[in-house]
Image (spheres, grey):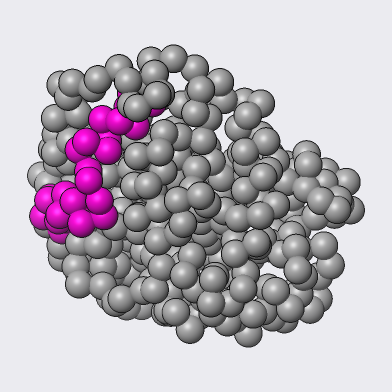
Amino acid sequence: MDDKLISKFNNFKSQGLSIDITRGKPDAAQLDLANDLLSMNVEPFDGNVDLRNYGEPFGIQDARALGADVLSAPVNNIITGEQSSLMLTYQMILSKYLFAEPLPWKDVEAPKFICPVPGFDRHFRMLEDFGIEMITVPLIDDGIDLDELSDTLQSNSNVLGIICVPRHSNPSGEVYSDDNINKLFKIGKKYSEDFLFLFDHAYLVHDFLPTKEQTPVWKLAEQNSTTNQTVVVTSFSKVTFGGGGLSFMAAASGNLDLIKRIRGSMVICPDKVNQKRHTKFFKDLSDIRNHMKKHADLIRPKFEIAYKALEKLDKDVGEYSQPTGGYFITFKSQKPIASNIVELCKEAGVLLTPAGATHPYGIDPKNNTLRIAPTFISEKELEIAMDVFVTAAQMAHNQG
């Protein structure tokens, strides 16, 4: 072991650091961008709708219209929900589990779902809650490895659908090409007319560098005649407030009926006052994009700090993604040392997302993939955290 590395690592340990880069959260300066929402006056009535009272479980009309603009889908296909797109996604899965036709998912023998990796740990936890087996396929530069997907579907029965993040994929940052999504529709539709395409568009408007153009997913679904099999969700969790934004879902036909049925049972009414505030704050998608440019100016320097630190690592130690948007960087080590890096960082006072979180069941077969979340902490803290990470990666590589 390199004595200089050990000395540097011991120096970090002596500082009593306590830095958390486990989750991709906005920092306070980003949240401040939407503070006008906190003092915004809203009239109690919106036409014939009393915003203070029960009702409108699918969202007020203005909020659904805003969602239609964001997702490029007809307003009649839009549900506006609570702050988290994950909640709408969970409700969609729950409705299919209980009430899907011709067969509820709870009655399907050994149900399965396709999960591109690396992926989002909360997606995996959700599917695990329902006892749905997760089958992985790798991501490539322009989206899903479609050859691998085709082979996987050919060799498996009862695959119910796929869940993916088509823009700035969590955590590795891929932006799916139109061609990739079009072929995904064709492959899934050929497998089953009931195959569900579930797109979590969590980072739809979260570019911080120039990013390739992407036709709206709903428009591609229309072109491929797959709207009845497609569900698209997004939210303002990282646009306005993490605990007080809005979420949107585009769905059609049976899927729209199911989400309305489950929300009709679960949701007496959404926060219509908050929905009205947001539709006053954002008139349309153009307003949202202008707002997100301010986010980009705050986020971009932190990613640059992270990249500058990671550049110090030799490629034989590992490589890292350089996304043009979103909230994460993925690091892949050459050796199976991800868990060792996490432990070393923890020992030095820096908390990372656990090794394996990027894969279903928390098991990364290669033990080499880690998610780095640089946004929440200060730039100074991030410089220290990344220095610790690079040192830990070098040490783990030498030990491994």
In the picture, measured across the screen, residue 397 lies left or right of residue 288, that is: right
| Vertical placement of residue 346 versus 342, above or below | above
Which part of the image, by quadrant, shows the N terminus? bottom left
Is residue 327 left or right of 282 when viewed as pictured? right
| Residue 126 coordinates in the image, percent (x, y) | 62, 43
Q: Residue at x 37, y 47 (%)?
A: 65
Q: In screen coordinates, is 21 left or right of 108?
A: left
| Range covered by the magenta-colored residues | 272-300
Residue 101 magenta-highlighted = no
**Count of numbered badges drawn on the protein:** 0
Quarter of the image for residue 22 reads top left
Tell me the residue at 22%/46% (across/down): 283
Q: Is residue 208 left or right of residue 346?
A: left
Please tell me which residue is depicted at 17% across the width and 41% down the height of the picture: 30
Q: In which quadrant of the rendered view does residue 239 lie? A: top left
Please indicate, yes or no, whether residue 383 appears anywhere in the rendered image.
no
Whole-percent x, y for residue 116 in the image:
56, 65
Secondary structure mainly formed by the magenta segment: helix
- Is 19 or 304 nearer to us in this picture? 304
Residue at figure coordinates x 31%, y 53% from the top left: 327
Q: Is residue 271 above or below residue 202?
A: above
